Image (tube, rainbow, N blue to C red):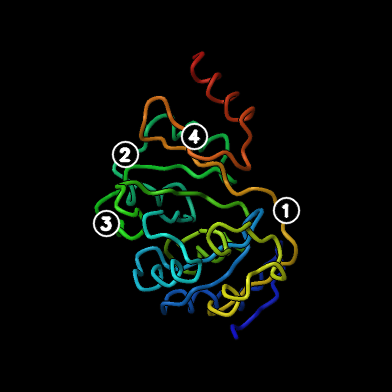
Amino acid sequence: MPEIRVIDPLRPDPDVIRHAGRMLRSGGVVCFPTSGLYGLGAVWNDEAAVRRIYAIKGRDRSKPILILVRNRSDISDLVTEIPDAAIRLMDRFWPGRLTLVFAAASSVPEILTAGSGKIGIRLPAHRVAQALIEETGAPITGTSANVSGEAGCSSIAELAAEVRTSVDLVLDAGALAGGSGSTVVDVTTDPVRVLRWGAVSMGEFQEVVERWQGL
Protein backbone atom coordinates (compact mmCIF):
# COMPACT_ATOMS: atom_id res chain seq x y z
CA MET A 1 0.00 0.00 0.00
CA PRO A 2 1.23 3.52 -0.69
CA GLU A 3 2.12 6.04 1.94
CA ILE A 4 -0.69 8.54 2.58
CA ARG A 5 0.05 12.00 3.98
CA VAL A 6 -2.71 14.43 4.94
CA ILE A 7 -1.81 17.94 3.83
CA ASP A 8 -3.38 21.34 4.44
CA PRO A 9 -4.60 22.68 1.05
CA LEU A 10 -3.95 26.29 2.06
CA ARG A 11 -0.74 25.92 4.06
CA PRO A 12 1.09 22.83 2.81
CA ASP A 13 3.51 21.38 5.36
CA PRO A 14 7.03 22.00 3.97
CA ASP A 15 8.26 18.68 5.36
CA VAL A 16 5.54 16.76 3.51
CA ILE A 17 6.25 18.69 0.32
CA ARG A 18 9.99 18.00 0.63
CA HIS A 19 9.27 14.31 1.10
CA ALA A 20 7.03 14.25 -1.98
CA GLY A 21 9.61 16.15 -4.02
CA ARG A 22 12.32 13.64 -3.09
CA MET A 23 10.04 10.82 -4.11
CA LEU A 24 9.36 12.39 -7.50
CA ARG A 25 13.03 13.09 -8.15
CA SER A 26 13.86 9.47 -7.34
CA GLY A 27 11.43 8.17 -9.98
CA GLY A 28 8.26 7.89 -7.94
CA VAL A 29 4.64 8.58 -8.82
CA VAL A 30 2.67 10.84 -6.48
CA CYS A 31 -1.08 11.39 -6.29
CA PHE A 32 -1.68 15.06 -5.47
CA PRO A 33 -4.47 17.67 -5.49
CA THR A 34 -5.15 20.17 -8.24
CA SER A 35 -7.96 22.72 -8.20
CA GLY A 36 -10.79 20.35 -8.97
CA LEU A 37 -9.47 16.80 -9.17
CA TYR A 38 -6.57 14.70 -7.94
CA GLY A 39 -3.74 14.10 -10.39
CA LEU A 40 -0.84 11.72 -10.94
CA GLY A 41 2.58 13.32 -10.88
CA ALA A 42 5.93 12.19 -12.21
CA VAL A 43 8.91 14.27 -13.29
CA TRP A 44 8.23 15.28 -16.89
CA ASN A 45 11.37 13.79 -18.45
CA ASP A 46 11.51 10.60 -16.35
CA GLU A 47 10.26 8.25 -19.05
CA ALA A 48 10.13 5.20 -16.78
CA ALA A 49 7.90 7.05 -14.30
CA VAL A 50 5.68 8.35 -17.10
CA ARG A 51 5.32 4.79 -18.43
CA ARG A 52 4.17 3.78 -14.95
CA ILE A 53 1.44 6.42 -15.11
CA TYR A 54 0.20 5.05 -18.43
CA ALA A 55 0.11 1.58 -16.87
CA ILE A 56 -1.61 2.74 -13.66
CA LYS A 57 -4.35 4.47 -15.62
CA GLY A 58 -4.59 1.85 -18.35
CA ARG A 59 -4.18 4.80 -20.70
CA ASP A 60 -3.72 4.30 -24.42
CA ARG A 61 -0.17 5.29 -25.36
CA SER A 62 -1.60 7.15 -28.37
CA LYS A 63 -3.01 9.73 -25.94
CA PRO A 64 -0.58 12.41 -24.69
CA ILE A 65 -0.10 13.44 -21.07
CA LEU A 66 -0.05 17.09 -20.01
CA ILE A 67 2.50 18.67 -17.72
CA LEU A 68 2.29 21.32 -14.98
CA VAL A 69 4.81 24.15 -14.64
CA ARG A 70 5.74 26.38 -11.70
CA ASN A 71 5.68 29.64 -13.69
CA ARG A 72 5.22 30.94 -17.21
CA SER A 73 8.94 31.37 -17.80
CA ASP A 74 9.37 27.57 -17.64
CA ILE A 75 7.41 27.23 -20.88
CA SER A 76 10.10 28.66 -23.16
CA ASP A 77 12.31 25.57 -22.76
CA LEU A 78 9.44 23.21 -23.48
CA VAL A 79 7.92 24.66 -26.64
CA THR A 80 9.07 25.97 -30.01
CA GLU A 81 6.84 29.05 -30.00
CA ILE A 82 4.51 30.97 -27.68
CA PRO A 83 1.87 32.53 -29.94
CA ASP A 84 0.18 35.82 -29.06
CA ALA A 85 -3.09 33.96 -28.55
CA ALA A 86 -1.43 31.80 -25.88
CA ILE A 87 -0.16 34.88 -24.06
CA ARG A 88 -3.65 36.39 -24.01
CA LEU A 89 -5.17 33.17 -22.68
CA MET A 90 -2.48 32.83 -20.02
CA ASP A 91 -3.06 36.45 -18.97
CA ARG A 92 -6.74 35.69 -18.43
CA PHE A 93 -6.86 32.14 -17.11
CA TRP A 94 -3.52 31.23 -15.51
CA PRO A 95 -2.98 30.02 -12.91
CA GLY A 96 -6.09 27.95 -13.35
CA ARG A 97 -7.89 25.19 -15.13
CA LEU A 98 -6.92 25.88 -18.74
CA THR A 99 -4.46 23.60 -20.53
CA LEU A 100 -2.72 25.06 -23.57
CA VAL A 101 -1.32 22.78 -26.26
CA PHE A 102 1.93 24.02 -27.84
CA ALA A 103 4.35 22.72 -30.44
CA ALA A 104 6.79 20.71 -28.32
CA ALA A 105 10.51 21.42 -28.19
CA SER A 106 12.86 18.61 -29.13
CA SER A 107 13.72 18.15 -25.44
CA VAL A 108 10.17 16.94 -24.64
CA PRO A 109 10.03 13.12 -24.52
CA GLU A 110 7.88 11.56 -27.22
CA ILE A 111 6.06 9.51 -24.58
CA LEU A 112 4.44 12.74 -23.33
CA THR A 113 3.41 13.93 -26.78
CA ALA A 114 2.31 10.46 -27.98
CA GLY A 115 4.11 11.23 -31.22
CA SER A 116 1.95 14.29 -31.92
CA GLY A 117 4.77 16.80 -31.66
CA LYS A 118 2.57 18.80 -29.26
CA ILE A 119 2.59 19.18 -25.48
CA GLY A 120 -0.21 20.27 -23.14
CA ILE A 121 0.88 22.66 -20.38
CA ARG A 122 -0.95 24.18 -17.43
CA LEU A 123 -0.01 26.47 -14.54
CA PRO A 124 -1.98 25.10 -11.57
CA ALA A 125 -3.73 27.27 -9.00
CA HIS A 126 -3.78 24.80 -6.10
CA ARG A 127 -1.18 25.64 -3.46
CA VAL A 128 -0.13 22.03 -2.90
CA ALA A 129 0.45 21.50 -6.62
CA GLN A 130 2.40 24.75 -6.83
CA ALA A 131 4.56 23.85 -3.84
CA LEU A 132 5.19 20.35 -5.17
CA ILE A 133 6.41 21.58 -8.55
CA GLU A 134 8.59 24.23 -6.90
CA GLU A 135 10.14 21.67 -4.56
CA THR A 136 10.71 19.15 -7.34
CA GLY A 137 12.48 21.79 -9.39
CA ALA A 138 10.97 20.60 -12.65
CA PRO A 139 7.61 20.30 -14.40
CA ILE A 140 5.53 17.29 -13.43
CA THR A 141 2.74 15.41 -15.15
CA GLY A 142 -0.80 16.46 -14.32
CA THR A 143 -3.04 13.76 -15.75
CA SER A 144 -6.08 12.91 -13.64
CA ALA A 145 -5.80 10.17 -11.01
CA ASN A 146 -8.32 7.79 -12.49
CA VAL A 147 -8.59 4.70 -14.63
CA SER A 148 -8.75 5.82 -18.24
CA GLY A 149 -12.34 6.35 -19.34
CA GLU A 150 -13.68 6.72 -15.80
CA ALA A 151 -14.55 9.92 -13.96
CA GLY A 152 -11.86 11.94 -12.20
CA CYS A 153 -11.66 11.92 -8.41
CA SER A 154 -12.31 14.89 -6.14
CA SER A 155 -11.47 12.95 -2.97
CA ILE A 156 -9.03 10.18 -2.08
CA ALA A 157 -11.96 7.94 -1.14
CA GLU A 158 -13.01 7.98 -4.81
CA LEU A 159 -9.68 6.68 -6.11
CA ALA A 160 -9.95 3.36 -7.89
CA ALA A 161 -8.17 0.58 -6.01
CA GLU A 162 -5.79 -0.04 -8.91
CA VAL A 163 -4.73 3.60 -8.81
CA ARG A 164 -4.47 3.93 -5.02
CA THR A 165 -2.36 0.79 -4.63
CA SER A 166 0.01 1.54 -7.52
CA VAL A 167 1.33 4.99 -6.63
CA ASP A 168 4.16 5.62 -4.19
CA LEU A 169 2.63 8.48 -2.22
CA VAL A 170 -0.80 10.08 -1.81
CA LEU A 171 -1.13 13.68 -0.68
CA ASP A 172 -4.62 13.92 0.80
CA ALA A 173 -5.85 17.52 0.83
CA GLY A 174 -9.45 16.56 1.53
CA ALA A 175 -12.39 17.16 -0.77
CA LEU A 176 -11.65 19.23 -3.86
CA ALA A 177 -14.01 21.32 -5.96
CA GLY A 178 -14.72 18.47 -8.37
CA GLY A 179 -16.39 19.10 -11.68
CA SER A 180 -14.83 18.56 -15.06
CA GLY A 181 -11.15 18.65 -15.84
CA SER A 182 -9.39 21.54 -17.51
CA THR A 183 -10.48 23.06 -20.78
CA VAL A 184 -7.87 22.15 -23.42
CA VAL A 185 -6.99 24.61 -26.20
CA ASP A 186 -4.59 24.01 -29.09
CA VAL A 187 -2.71 27.27 -29.67
CA THR A 188 -0.67 25.91 -32.58
CA THR A 189 -3.53 26.71 -34.97
CA ASP A 190 -4.91 30.07 -36.10
CA PRO A 191 -7.55 30.53 -34.89
CA VAL A 192 -6.93 28.49 -31.75
CA ARG A 193 -8.94 25.28 -31.45
CA VAL A 194 -10.72 23.96 -28.36
CA LEU A 195 -9.97 20.25 -28.00
CA ARG A 196 -12.04 19.72 -24.86
CA TRP A 197 -14.45 21.87 -22.92
CA GLY A 198 -14.03 21.72 -19.16
CA ALA A 199 -13.63 24.06 -16.22
CA VAL A 200 -13.30 27.16 -18.40
CA SER A 201 -16.72 27.57 -19.97
CA MET A 202 -17.49 28.32 -23.58
CA GLY A 203 -18.85 31.72 -22.55
CA GLU A 204 -15.71 32.71 -20.65
CA PHE A 205 -13.48 31.57 -23.47
CA GLN A 206 -15.43 33.26 -26.23
CA GLU A 207 -15.51 36.52 -24.26
CA VAL A 208 -11.72 36.60 -24.25
CA VAL A 209 -11.41 35.65 -27.92
CA GLU A 210 -13.95 38.26 -28.99
CA ARG A 211 -12.15 40.91 -26.94
CA TRP A 212 -8.77 40.36 -28.59
CA GLN A 213 -10.31 39.98 -32.05
CA GLY A 214 -11.90 43.38 -31.55
CA LEU A 215 -8.56 45.07 -30.88
Q: Point out the tag, 3 or 2, that comes first from the N-terminus.
A: 2
For this rendering, which residue is in front, 62 or 141?
Answer: 62
Which kind of residue does numbered mark 4 sit on? Val
Q: Nearer the viewer, residue 32 or 147?
A: 147
Q: Are marks 2 and 1 in contact (CB under 8 Å)?
A: no
Q: Residue at x 62, y 75 (%)?
A: 161
For the image, the number of numbered tags is 4
Q: Which mark is residue 150?
A: none
The residue depicted at 70 percent of the width and 53 percent of the height is: 178
Q: Are marks 4 and 1 in contact (CB under 8 Å)?
A: no
Nearer the camera: disc 3 or disc 1: 1
- Residue pointed to by mark 3: 107
Task: Please report whichever mark, 4 or 3, sits nearer to the chain's N-terminal start.
Answer: 3
3D distance between C-alphas at marks 3 and 2 = 14 Å
Cα gap from disc 2 to disc 4, whole angstroms:
18 Å
Q: Amino acid at mark 2?
A: Glu
- Crowding at label 2, few (<14), some or many (≥20) Cα neighbours within 10 Å? some
In the picture of the structure, the residue carrying the numbered disc 4 is: 194
Q: The residue tagged with tag 4: helix, strand or loop?
A: strand
| Residue at numbered disc 1 | 177
Disc 4 to disc 3, C-alpha distance: 25 Å
Q: Which numbered disc flags the more N-terminal residue, 2 or 1? A: 2
Q: Which residue is mark 2?
A: 81
